[in-house]
């Protein structure tokens, strides 16, 4: 029985699990939609929403207290990878700063939303191993 046991192990050791969580959250923030297993989506969903809430808290403090905004950015930078490489339509690659996108694009979009920034849609089973798959996406206003 798993009474009072928090989190899922996902058949990984601690370092691998933490790296997986950080990378999946960064991919969700950069691409705004990821397809993964349902267990991984359920695992990262609360952490991703907390990152967006942290960014919103950093935005709301920019008027009077710049130290709170700086603190929020440093916390986000400590919990997320630095950058992601994305491919544009013309085939070129560009570096996307994850923390900058979180604070300048995603957080202002959800400034007036009290929570519920992500949506998980189940899409069936994966053909190879019959794992339950889901699409985790950021909701649109």
Image (spheres, helix red, strand yellow):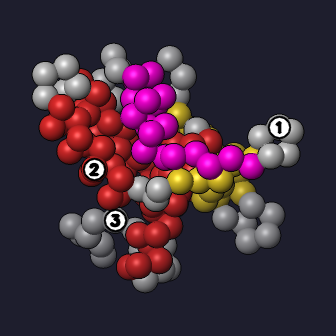
Q: Residue at x 34, y 21 (%)?
A: 111
Q: Dot 2 lies on which element? A: helix
Q: Main secondary structure of the magenta part?
A: helix
Q: Dot 1 lies on which element? A: loop
Which residue bears the numbered disc 3? 7
Disc on the earlier residue, 3 or 1: 3
Residue 38, x across and y down, in percent: 56, 56
Residue 98, x across and y down, in percent: 49, 46
Q: Vertically, is 106 above or below 92?
A: above
Residue 65, x across and y down, in percent: 13, 28
The reply to whether the C-beta atoms of the residues labelled 3 and 2 are less than 8 Å apart is no
Instruction: Please report the bounds of the magenta region as a residue range.
Output: 93-110
Specify the label residue 65 is tagged with.
Answer: none
User: In the picture, which quadrant includes the N terminus?
Assistant: bottom left
Crowdedness near tag 2: few (<14), some (14–19) or many (≥20) residues, C-alpha within 10 Å: few
Crowdedness near tag 1: few (<14), some (14–19) or many (≥20) residues, C-alpha within 10 Å: few
Judge by depth and name the residue closer to the eye, 10 or 82.
82
Which residue bears the numbered disc 2? 74
Q: Residue at x 41, y 56 (%)?
A: 80
Q: Is residue 13 visible?
A: yes
Disc on the earlier residue, 2 or 1: 2
Tally the marks: 3
Judge by depth and name the residue closer to the eye, 48 or 94.
94
The reply to whether the C-beta atoms of the residues labelled 3 and 1 are less than 8 Å apart is no
* Residue at the limit of the structure toward the right, as seen here: 90
| In this picture, residue 14 sits left or right of residue 137 | left
Q: Is residue 117 visible?
A: no
Q: Residue at x 23, y 41 (%)?
A: 70
Specify the label residue 89 is tagged with.
Answer: 1
Residue 55, x across and y down, in percent: 32, 36
């Amino acid at each position: 029985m798993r009474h009072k046991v928090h989190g899922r192990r996902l058949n990984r050791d601690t370092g691998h699990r933490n790296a997986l969580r950080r990378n999946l959250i960064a991919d969700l923030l950069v691409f705004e939609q990821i397809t993964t297993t349902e267990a991984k989506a359920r695992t990262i969903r609360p952490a991703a929403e907390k990152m967006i809430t942290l960014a919103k808290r950093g935005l709301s403090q920019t008027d009077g207290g710049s130290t709170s905004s700086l603190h929020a950015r440093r916390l986000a930078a400590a919990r997320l990878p630095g950058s992601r490489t994305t491919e544009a339509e013309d085939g070129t690659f560009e570096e996307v700063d994850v923390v900058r996108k979180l604070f300048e694009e995603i957080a202002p979009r959800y400034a007036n939303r009290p929570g519920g920034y992500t949506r998980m849609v189940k899409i069936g089973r994966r053909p190879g191993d019959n794992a339950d798959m889901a699409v985790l996406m950021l909701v649109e206003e």
